[in-house]
Amino acid sequence: MTVVIEGLTGQELVSADLFDRLVNRIAKERDMTREFAARIMDQALAFLRACSETPPTAWPFRTR
């Protein structure tokens, strides 16, 4: 089963200041460009949002 959420971006889920701090931390700790770190952070936040909006019955695994 595939769940699609239209217009999903992670950056809009947190304040601009928090997003910048998270991106800067990733870029520094992983020695990568800020642009690449921003893409990673955006997708990580989008994944968390998708998880929160997906009903448990759609999960491919069981929880106890």
Image: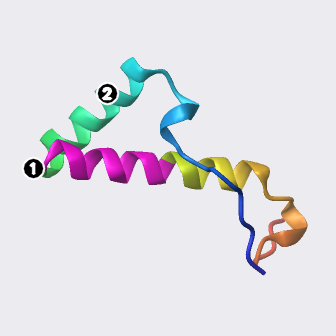
The image quadrant that residue 18 belongs to is: top left
**What's the residue type where badge 2 is placed?**
Asp
Q: Position of residue 62 (x, y in %)?
A: 81, 74
Residue at the extreme left of the image, as rendered: 31
Magenta residues, start to end = 33-44
Residue 42 is covered by the magenta coloring = yes
> Which label sits on residue 31?
1
Q: Which colour scheme is used?
A: rainbow
| Side of 11 where 47 appears, left or right | right
Q: Is mark 1 on a helix, strand or loop?
A: loop
10 Å neighbourhood of mark 1: few (<14), some, or many (≥20)? few
Q: Residue 36, percent across and down?
A: 23, 53
Identify the residue at image location x=29%, y=37%: 23
Q: Earlier in the sequence, mark 1 or mark 2?
A: 2
Location of the C terminus by quadrant is bottom right
Per the image, the residue denoted by label 2 is: 20
In terms of depth relative to the viewer, which is nearer, 6 or 34?
A: 6
